Image (cartoon, grey):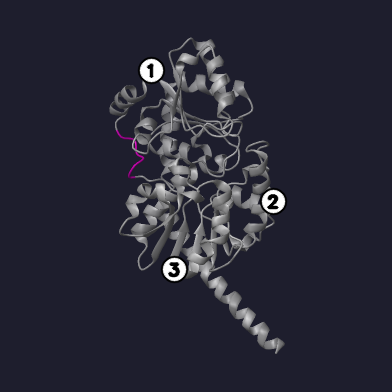
Amino acid sequence: MRIGISTSVIQRGQTGVAQYLFALLRALAAQGGNHRFTLYVLREDLPLFDFAKGVMELVPVAERFRPPVRNILWHQASLPGLARRHQLEVLHVPSYRRLLWPRPCPLVATIHDLAPFRVPEKYDWKRMFYGKIIARRLARRQDQIIAISENTERDMVNFFALPRESITVVYNGIEHERFFPGSREEAKAAMAQRYGLNQPFFLYVARLEHPGKNHVRLVSAFEEFKAATNSDWQLALGGSDWHGAETIHVAIKASPFAGDIRCLGFVPDCDLPDLYRAADAFVYPSLYEGFGLPPLEAMACGCPVISSARGSLGEVLGEAAALVEPDDIHTIAKQLFILATDGAVRNRLRAAGLAQAARFDWNRTAAETLRVYDRAVTGRKNEGGKSKINAAKCC
């Protein structure tokens, strides 16, 4: 099968969609068989896809199409022609923000979440309008849609009015060859040297986005924890600045414990496993997630997790995390205190987390994704056959 995949929504590799796409492509490359993959990649992003060279065809896309509006127009006006020229049998767009209206071949989309419907002011008004109005119509033009959780599937049925038969739930995976317990001592030494994390620390890995990722309440909970314990624990925030990041930085600067709050910036892939291993607890108080890869990755590295249960997080993490209500600062602070002071709780969550993370694997995700491609192709053929039958009846 000739499979095309659009990659221009990865934001230079610094988003959750990017991590989804990189991991999925690695797994697809390993089990692709007779399939041929064509990746459409913004020119400056090409080095990020070195792992696919020689296995997948990389088609450069001019940098002038990187800005969001131009990129949307490129998907609608240029990508359909490329799909025909490359004789694609199926085209996969891994984000609802770039779904195609033209149907040059069977179309598959991945929808990670419908957060604009769930989190007020998550984005600026233009992105909120696009997510709520435009994407809703575009989603109906797709042959098959992958939802990365049952929660996201329910949201698509409720908010996009999509038929369930067009949706397949395919959970994200964990790259277990990267994320595993390893040596905590070596990881702590490396992270202390690289990021100055010399004390026990809570870790949160998510782009600095306000209000969606809930950093400001986490900072307040950390202040409450520090004031109550007078401990030397630190809070490390890994992630690049995003919408509303200035609000987060203001809250940190105003904190009486600002010296113990470290903004690490975007954490390179090579550092992420050791950062999870070095952390004494991972905290994920997000207001809404379509899946939630970071807490699962932390679990796979043996790090105990505190998490919100919003969106799909309760579904994905189960009973392996200490779940909190993300709007309740005192509840978050209480869990910080428990994990900082109770080694037995940390050990219980560590063991439960390892077992939970073992349930998710990108090889399984890739195999199920290939089956979705097959269904999209078969469905379009059947659609064409019905059109010919109807035409014959008319004649």
What is the C-alpha distance between the residues marked 3 and 1?
54 Å
Nearer to us of marks 2 and 3 is 3
Observer-nearest residue: 141 or 43? 43
Which comes sooner in the sequence, label 1 or label 2?
Answer: 2
Residue annotated with mark 3 = 86
Observer-nearest residue: 194 or 134? 134
Observer-nearest residue: 159 or 281? 159
- Amino acid identity at mark 2: Ile
Q: Quadrant of the N terminus?
A: bottom left
What is the C-alpha distance between the residues marked 2 and 3?
31 Å
Residue annotated with mark 1 = 199
What is the C-alpha distance between the residues marked 1 and 2?
47 Å
Q: Which residue lies at the image location 60% right of the left edge and 38% below the top edge? A: 288
Nearer to us of marks 1 and 2 is 2
Q: Is residue 77 above or below residue 331?
A: below
Locate residue 253, reporting x and y percent. Answer: 53, 17
Observer-nearest residue: 65 or 348? 65
Q: Is residue 129 left or right of residue 92?
A: right
- Amino acid identity at mark 1: Gln
Checking the image for residue 133, the label placed there is: 2
Locate residue 125, reporting x and y percent. Answer: 68, 40
- Amino acid identity at mark 3: His
Q: Which residues are magenta?
A: 177-182
